[in-house]
Image (cartoon, rainbow, N blue to C red):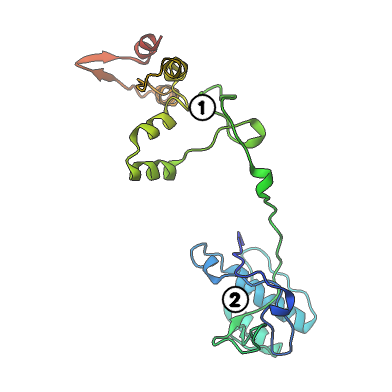
């Protein structure tokens, strides 16, 4: 169901919420992981799993042909379970019932293994993509840190214009600025003139392949990509 279950609490088994018959639940998921992702199918699976357990049967649900809401309610009733699919749980630490019934059932879960230790990565300089001249992506390829739209918005929000310019040009695909930046650091100069990023030139070439011509004008003079490249040289 495209589910990324948000685990609410991690507790010892004896402190987990339990059913009226004393059975402790195994995983507590946060319901806020459902509405925005619109993966409601997992809740139907939860109910059908409960029915299958009680009736000692197997449920087969073909893609796009799963049981409708009314069918699930009928099956829950047949299994002697509440039609809502919810039941009163009891707090494992106090023994008191929770004030609202909770959706309980059996659902297939697979642990997604992401260990922070395996994610550590650093790069000074490294390989660049042949076409865009941007740093490669991914730890295995000694790639750079992705700086996406939302990160751009964050720096814009702080007004960090020069940091943003550096991230998107000299630290990425502005070939001229990339070669000049070392000289600037050695000389202790704080200014850096950036040129046309390589990815923009790739965009222009792609548009030209679609028979769309772009014209660039600066101070009343017409420029081409070739002119820009000559200037940068």
Label 1 to label 2: alpha-carbon separation: 50 Å
Based on the displayed image, in which of its 4 quarters is residue 89 positioned? bottom right
Residue 68 - label: 2
Most extreme residue toward the left is: 220
Residue at the image point whose x is 59% and y is 81% from the top: 102
Query: How crowded is the residue under tag 2: few (<14 C-alpha within 10 Å), some, or many (20+)?
Result: few
Say left or right for 227 vs 68: left
Say left or right for 167 vs 4: left
Residue at the image point whose x is 38% and y is 21% from the top: 196
Residue 53 percent location from the top left of the image: 76, 79
Which is nearer the N-term, disc 1 or disc 2? 2
Based on the displayed image, in which of its 4 quarters is residue 144 positioned? top right
Of 224 and 233, which appears nearest the observer?
233
Of 99 and 103, which appears nearest the observer?
99
Q: Are marks 1 and 2 in contact (CB under 8 Å)?
A: no
Q: As displayed, is residue 119 above or below residue 107?
A: above
In the picture, the quarter occupied by the C terminus is top left
Residue 145 percent location from the top left of the image: 54, 36
Say left or right for 136 vs 95: left
Say left or right for 25 vs 34: right
Residue highlighted by disc 1: 134
């Amino acid at each position: 169901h495209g589910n990324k279950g948000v685990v609410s609490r991690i507790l010892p088994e004896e402190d987990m919420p339990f059913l009226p018959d004393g059975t402790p639940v195994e995983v507590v998921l946060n319901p806020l992981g459902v509405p925005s992702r619109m993966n409601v199918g997992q809740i139907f699976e939860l109910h059908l799993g409960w029915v299958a357990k009680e009736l000692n049967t197997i449920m087969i649900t073909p893609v796009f042909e799963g049981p409708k809401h009314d069918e699930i309610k009928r099956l829950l009733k047949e299994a002697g379970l509440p039609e809502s699919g919810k039941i009163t749980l009891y707090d494992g630490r106090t023994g008191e019932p929770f004030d609202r019934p909770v959706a309980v059932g059996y659902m297939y879960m697979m642990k997604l293994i992401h260990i922070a230790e395996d994610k550590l990565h650093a790069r000074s300089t490294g390989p660049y993509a042949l076409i865009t001249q941007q740093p490669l992506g991914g730890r295995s390829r000694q790639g750079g840190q992705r700086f996406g739209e939302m990160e751009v918005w964050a720096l814009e929000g702080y007004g960090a214009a020069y940091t943003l310019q550096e991230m998107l040009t000299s630290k990425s695909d502005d070939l001229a600025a990339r070669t000049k930046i070392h000289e600037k650091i050695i000389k202790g100069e704080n200014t850096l003139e950036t040129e046309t990023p390589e990815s923009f030139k790739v965009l222009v070439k792609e548009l030209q392949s679609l028979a769309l011509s772009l014209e660039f004008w600066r101070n009343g003079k017409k420029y081409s990509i070739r002119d820009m490249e000559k200037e940068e040289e």
